[in-house]
Image: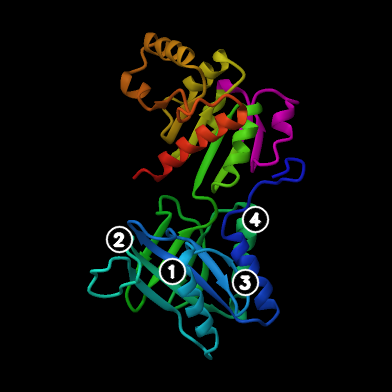
Amino acid sequence: MDILTASPPAPRDMLVWQHATANLRAGIPVALLCVLNSVGSSPGRQGFKMSVTAVSMAGSIGGGIMEHKFVEKARGLLLQDAAAPVVRHQVHRREAPADRSGLICSGEQWILVLPLHSADLPVILELKQLLRAHIPGQLRLSAAHRVEVLAAEPQVPAYALHLGPDWYYTEQLGFQDHVTIVGGGHVALALSRVLAALEFELTVLDDRPGLNTHLFNPFAHHKRIVRYETLEREIVAGPRQYVILMTFGYRTDLLALRQLLALPVRYLGVMGSASKITEMLDTLREEGVPEATLARIHAPIGLAIHSRTPEEIAISIAAELIRERNTP
């Protein structure tokens, strides 16, 4: 990815909706595939989507024979007039008494095949606008109303599924996980580049106006100049919020960390050497910070792969974030 021509990444689904829009406008039949739920070891996770026509497709529901089978199922439905949506339960176990998929990876999935129509185009255009502008909202797929956009609601699950004749599925639009990098230097730029491919909405904060690696970071969705003394006001709390401190030096890292110790986020990490982190934690202990609070801090961040360059450090940090995100 060329930094000079890069831009903040769009959510994964944008390509699917763009493909669907172009074909519906051209009068070409399109079907939407969506993994409504995924349990255990299965190809494709909940929320994965594809748009499929007779000759083209975009997105993925996991690849392999499973995806191929459902692409063919979708193309078969597109040959029918007024085909109804189909929800299929797939069990990936040879000994399953019913709904065997032919796979043996041991998980289960519920996959939707939903023919789209020109009447769905206004809703899909609204979806694209919300995704492009990072505006909160919900997608709802259902037997009754097909494709809908609903207003965002706080404290609702990222995904919800109700099965049965009146089935419906909802998901929060856009990125489900948000990373805030505090400190916009060389490692922040390298990490932003890696995270651009990992479905994180990305904010980069720094207290230095004119810092080139911050100003010219093309991968961040949001960039701001802030005062670390009031950092807590700049970061949203929540179970899908990840915060990484990598400021100019020890003093500013400690200043920033003090602001965030009580903030309830999924992940709070600090970059630095082992000796630096030891001194920082000792200082906080002397200031009376409880051990339970200190135990929340990931430091030094990054998996131990002997990383040296900013790019290698970025890979090690991204791997740790993936592990944290995918750990129940």
Q: Amino acid at mark 3?
A: Ala
Q: Residues within 10 Å of mark 2 (few under 14, many from 20)?
A: some
Residue type (three-letter) at the residue carrying disc 2: Ser
Residue holding disc 3: 20
Q: CA distance from mark 1 to mark 3?
A: 21 Å
Look at the image and give the residue range highlighted in magenta. Answer: 204-229
Q: Which residue is mark 2?
A: 106
CB atoms at circles 1 and 2 under 8 Å apart? no
Helix, strand or loop at disc 3? helix
Give the left or right position of residue 67, taking residue 51 as reference: left
Q: Which residue does the image show at 53% across and 91% down from the upper left?
A: 81
The spot of residue 129 in percent (x, y) is: 65, 60
Front: mark 4 or 1:
1
The residue under the point 36% across, 12% down is 288
The residue that disc 1 covers is 66
Q: Which mark is residue 132?
A: 4
Q: Nearer the viewer, mark 2 or mark 4?
A: 2
Disc 4 residue type (three-letter): Arg
Label 1 packing within 10 angstroms: few (<14), some (14-19), many (20+): some
> What's the residue type where badge 1 is placed?
Met
Q: Mark 4 or 1 closer to N-term?
A: 1
Label count reads 4
